[in-house]
Image (cartoon, helix red, strand yellow):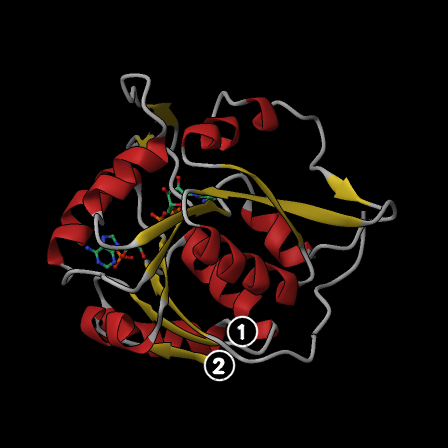
């Protein structure tokens, strides 16, 4: 597979990202290259400007949690599973916001290994949706690894598919539009109950290569 993310002419969006770790910075880069304005925060916002500059992110702004919420309708919860509850308790009510949920229920151990946590048979996104009850949740970006964001959507077979799921059609459309601007191909796989196929152990996680739209 080869190729890089194409830059597209599109209406620029504001995207808020909570978390500037592996997935937060990877998504920030993806959206930045697509021309969107990224408002991103972590627990050390004073260190963020240098980090964003080092990553070459031209449209990303180091922000406080409140600034992220105020600046964007599309909000990404890019913190670890066990950090989500604390983060969401710090947030105001999120009426009118779309919560993009890339979270997988892993605990990271001290030695760097990860353990899959039990969710009592519930879709992980249903659990996250309960933490942001006023927002419209869309499951997306949880099944990509960070190298895939860097290498981009183009392969010799076609473009890589970015699956998403959710209960709110308008929110799915907004996130699908965002995905299209990055060059990946959005495919809605169903509602929150169906989003289990995207979780660790789900059917779409068992594929040996990502889905590709020729
Ligand atoms: N890593 C991947 O390739 C990948 C792929 C798909 C999905 N995911 C999912 O994405 C989520 C994040 O994973 P990750 O690997 O990116 O984790 P990570 O590298 O540990 O990054 C977590 C980030 O969240 C920030 N954070 C934690 N609590 C916060 C709070 N209350 N307010 C603001 N920022 C806070 C941390 O800030 P500090 O740096 O200041 O501590 C850090 O920047 C997980 O659910 C994971 O399963 C990861």
Q: Are marks 1 and 2 in contact (CB under 8 Å)?
A: yes
**Would you call the spot at circle 2 few (<14 residues within 10 Å), some (14-19), or many (20 or more)?**
some
Q: Is residue 89 left or right of residue 100?
A: left
Residue 117 location (% of width, % of height)? 30, 23
List x then y, in percent, for residue 75. 35, 62
In the rendering, which numbered label is found on residue 64? none
Residue found 81% across the figure and 46% down from its top? 1
Q: Where is residue 57? Give x, y as percent.
A: 50, 76
In front here: 28 or 139? Answer: 139
**C-alpha gap between disc 1 and disc 2:** 5 Å
**In the image, is 105 to the left or to the right of 7?**
left
Please, is residue 53 above or below residue 127 in the view? below
What residue does disc 2 label? 59
- Name the N-terminal-most of marks 1 and 2: 1
Counting other residues with Cα less than 10 Å from the Cα at mark 1, is it few (<14), some (14-19), or many (20 or more)?
many
Residue positioned 61% across, 49% down in the render: 147
The foreground one among 131 and 174 is: 174
Residue at 16 percent across and 60 percent down: it is 93
Please give the name of the residue rendered at 68% of the width and 80% of the height, measured from the top-left corner: 9
Residue at the extreme right of the image, as rendered: 156
Residue 189 picture quarter: top right
Q: Secondary structure at mark 2?
A: loop
Q: Position of residue 145 (x, y in %)?
A: 56, 43
Task: Check disc 1 and report its element: helix, strand or loop.
Answer: helix
């Amino acid at each position: 597979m080869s190729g890089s993310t194409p830059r597209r002419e599109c209406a620029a969006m504001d995207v808020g990202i909570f978390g500037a770790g592996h997935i937060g910075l990877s998504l920030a880069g993806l959206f930045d290259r697509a021309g969107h304005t990224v408002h991103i925060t972590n627990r050390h916002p004073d260190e963020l400007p240098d980090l964003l500059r080092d990553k070459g992110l031209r449209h990303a702004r180091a922000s406080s949690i409140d600034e992220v919420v105020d600046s964007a309708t599309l909000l990404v919860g890019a913190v670890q599973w066990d950090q989500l509850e604390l983060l969401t308790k710090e947030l105001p009510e999120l009426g009118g916001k779309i919560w993009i949920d890339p979270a997988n229920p892993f605990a990271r151990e001290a030695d760097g290994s990860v353990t899959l946590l039990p969710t009592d048979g519930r879709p992980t996104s249903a659990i996250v949706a309960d933490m942001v009850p006023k927002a419209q949740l869309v499951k997306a970006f949880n099944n990509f690894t960070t190298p895939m964001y860097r290498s981009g959507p183009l392969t010799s077979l076609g473009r890589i598919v970015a699956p998403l799921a959710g209960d709110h059609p308008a929110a799915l459309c907004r996130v699908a539009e965002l995905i299209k601007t990055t060059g990946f191909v959005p495919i809605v796989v169903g509602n929150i109950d169906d989003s289990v196929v995207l979780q660790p152990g789900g059917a779409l996680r068992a594929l040996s290569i990502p889905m590709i739209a020729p």
